[in-house]
Image: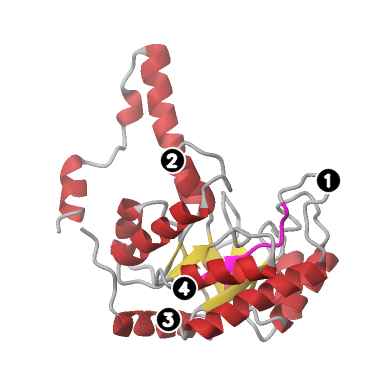
Amino acid sequence: MLTPPTPAQLDARHAQFRALHASGCFVIPNPWDVGSARYLASLGFKALATTSSGFAWSHGRPDNAMARDAVLDYLRAIVAATDLPVNADFESGFADTPEGVADNVTLACATGVSGLSIEDSTGTPDAPLMEIPRAVERLRAARAAIDASGQNVMLIGRAENFFVGRPDIADAIARLRAYAEAGADCLYAPGIHTREQIAAVVAACAPKPVNVLIGGTSAFTMADMAALGVRRVSVGGGLARAAWGGFMRAARELAEQGRFDGFAGAASGRDLNTLFQP
């Protein structure tokens, strides 16, 4: 059984998480379940972040299709799985109104997460981004809820332009600046991918830290991210997709060719049992 951290342990995690954003550059990988969280912790990462897509796929659902309460349970499980700070992918707050976002952020803070992000996407294809005033109002509500919780939880403001087919860097920067003024502690525009875009976002958001997503193969290294002034790098559903890729290749070879070659490179049962010893 997973044991939730004590209030003192949470305070220490929250402080540690904020300190990671003060200088340097760190990578924050995204586990989709307790096992993947524990393995990532064993590798020495300094913090973890949940992944809405990886979690949904593990339940046979598409991204953004999991109910709020299921996501809250997921957050509790990841927080209890290791002693690392956890950042929550809290999608768009699971509510349309600022009041609803505030209520749900209060629930998220109670799970023990050290940070949470709120998106500005609508889920509507013909109008995929919220108007900036509405998005700002929701961020302000999230900020107020965090402050009222008494928890030192970081708020991450997300501009979803590049994820929803509106790759307008000027609009993304305007959004991130507005979210910073609304109380976001860290800014994030998933999908930006060129040096010029990353440098522009970092400069526009300074002195607040910026998160960059690298969810697939990339010529960038962590040293490159640090040189560009990025504070943290997340991989989103990248690790989950890598795991699914190996599973799907092995399963297809078995189903279509009757071959077992796909098991080459598989983790040993002995190693996994040793890793997960209580």
Asked if the residue under mark 4 is in contact with the one under mark 2, i.e. CB atoms within 8 Å, the reply is: no
- Tell whether label 3 touches label 4 (CB within 8 Å): no
For numbered disc 1, what is the local secondary structure? loop
Report the side of 239 relative to 177 (left or right).
Answer: left
Q: Which residues make up the magenta segment?
A: 114-122
Q: Secondary structure at mark 2?
A: loop
Residues at marks 2 and 1, CA–CA distance in whole angstroms: 28 Å
Q: CA distance from mark 3 to mark 1?
A: 39 Å
Q: How is the image coloured?
A: secondary structure
CB under 8 Å between discs 3 and 1? no
Residue sitting at x 30%, y 59%: 38
Residue in the foreground of this view, choosing between 100 and 274:
100
Residue of label 4: 109
Q: Residues within 10 Å of mark 3 (few under 14, many from 20)?
A: many
- 97 or 78: nearer the eye? 97
Q: CA distance from mark 2 to mark 4?
A: 24 Å
Above or below, 58 relative to 210: above
Q: Earlier in the sequence, mark 2 or mark 1?
A: 2
Up the image or down, 172 lies above or below 11; here it is above
- Looking at the rendering, which quadrant does residue 221 occupy? bottom right
- Amino acid at pointer 1: Asp
Type of amino acid under label 4: Cys
Q: Is residue 123 above or below residue 20?
A: above
Mark found first going from the N terminus, 2 or 4: 2
Disc on res. 126: 1
Type of amino acid under label 3: His
From mark 1 to mark 4, how far is it between C-alphas? 33 Å
> How many numbered marks appear?
4
Q: Which mark is residue 14?
A: 3
Q: Residues within 10 Å of mark 2 (few under 14, many from 20)?
A: few
The answer to whether residue 85 of the structure is visible from this angle is yes
